[in-house]
Image (tube, rainbow, N blue to C red):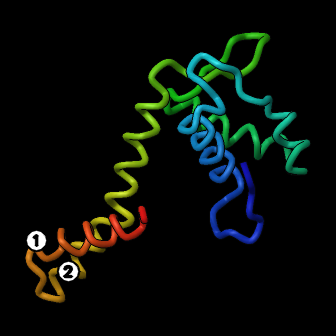
Amino acid sequence: MQLNFNDDRPIFLQIAEGIEDGILVGAFPEEGQIPSTTEISMTYKINPATALKGVSRLAEEGILYKRRGLGMFVAKGAVSKVKEKRKAAFLDQYVAGLIQEAKRLGLTLGETMELIERSYHHEQD
């Protein structure tokens, strides 16, 4: 996980996203423990309350859960929850704008899909 202190996004959101990234790539497996807020705050030299805010956000979303006296753990089904959350954000942040621009340019759905497929396959090469 990396924090960018020059980013416009709040640090607590970057922490939450970093943990989500770790969940998606398997660094934090379901039912596995994540670093404590103290560890996070010491590693990144941030206020522990900021780390707690990021972790608490994921707990509120059901992605993490607390084991009393042991710390925070990744919930069962967290990978699916994170993927669904990110798909919805992807739709809002990228796809909706892409569709609007395609319509402004007069592109058909087929032409738009062709451009997407060409770009998608080009990036895999």
Is 109 displayed left or right of 15 in the figure? left
Q: Quadrant of the C terminus?
A: bottom left
In the rendered image, the vertical position of residue 51 relative to residue 9, given as above or below: above
Q: Position of residue 66 (x, y in %)?
A: 66, 18
Q: Residue at x 38, y 57 (%)?
A: 90
Judged from the image, the secondary structure of the residue bearing numbered disc 1 is helix
Describe residue 32's horizontal placement relative to residue 113 as left or right: right
Residue appearing at x 27%, y 71% in the figure: 118
Numbered badge on residue 109: 1
Identify the secondary structure beneath mark 2. Answer: helix
The vertical placement of 122 against 107, above or below, is above
Count of numbered badges drawn on the protein: 2
| Amino acid carrying mark 2 in the image | Ala
Please tell me which of labels 1 and 2 falls first in the chain: 2
Badge 1: residue crowd in 10 Å (few <14, some 14–19, many ≥20):
few
Residue furthest toward the front?
Answer: 125
Quarter where residue 96 is shown: bottom left
| Residue 120 screen position, x and y as percent | 34, 65
* Position in image of residue 81 (x %, y %): 42, 33
Determine the residue positioned at 58% across, 29% down. 59
Task: Farthest residue to the bottom: give it.
Answer: 105
Q: Considering depth in this image, is 83 or 62 the residue closer to the camera?
A: 83
| Mark drawn on residue 102 | 2
